[in-house]
Image: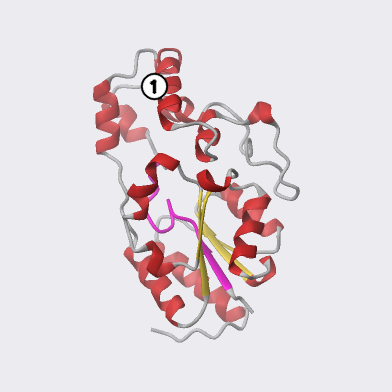
Amino acid sequence: MIELVIFDYGGVISESLLRDFSDFERRRELPAGSVSRLLFGDRPANAGGGDPVDGAVDPDEISDFHRLETGELDFATYLNQVLAAAPDILGRDLEPADLEAFSGSTGPRIYWPIVHEIWRLRAQGLRLALLTNNVREFHDTWWDSFPVEECFDVVIDSSEVGMRKPDSRIYTLTCEQAGSKPTAAVFLDDNYDNIEAARALGIEVVHVGLDPLVAIAELQEILGRRGTKVKNR
């Protein structure tokens, strides 16, 4: 039986802010793929997350963005490093207008069907947790985007605990704080590496795409298959 449902934030509760930079690159006449390289660096797909089984991390593979999300790097330092690297990656300096255009095109857009499903599950007694890779300086922005405290028993923010998905330790911590075993949990995330790391621990998973209603249906199928009694709407 499933006792605990764990939700990611960006890409699950909110529209992903970092999914696709192609439109921004076209509008600012930047090389295709350059913004992702600038923000995240060139690295293996699982770099910085460690092995999904033992959580080991190679320090040489940890990008500045990963250090930002684990609280090792403050946002001002990270931004200065991005600005310094921009000429080599973008072919020119990153101008204030570029930053303004990008920030103006992003912001937390909440998937309210997911939030309503969270409320429904909570009302029926399921334990609920939020597990997010996030940035310390952005905490108030995402926290105020929907009623977090009304939705979740446990909130794990990577920048507060010093580790990030797909490090296996952060899933174990989430389950421990919620009082559930990994094998009694289901996890929703839009990132493949994060999903596979959770699956390796015995957690049921929903790989969330662009349609929140599909994710809700998959979650309901898992709950039903695992014998968790949840009333229909």
Residue 110 visible from this viewpoint: yes
Q: Which residues are magenta?
A: 4-18
Percent position of residue 156, x then y: 53, 55
Residue found at x 58% / y 43%: 162
Which residue occupies the foreground of this view, 209 or 223?
223
Apparent side of residue 158 relative to residue 79 in the rendered image (left or right):
right
Question: Which residue corresponds to mark 1?
Answer: 31
Residue 204 visible from this viewpoint: no
Binning the other alpha carbons within 10 Å of mark 1 as few (below 14), some (14 to 19) or many (20 upward) gives few
Q: Amino acid at mark 1?
A: Pro
Per the picture, the main secondary structure of the magenta-coloured stretch is loop
Apparent side of residue 112 relative to residue 226 in the rendered image (left or right):
left
Which residue occupies the foreground of this view, 140 or 31?
140
Percent position of residue 66, x then y: 55, 36
Relative height, residue 203 to residue 158 (above, below)? below
Percent position of residue 134, x then y: 47, 45
Residue found at x 42% / y 51%: 10
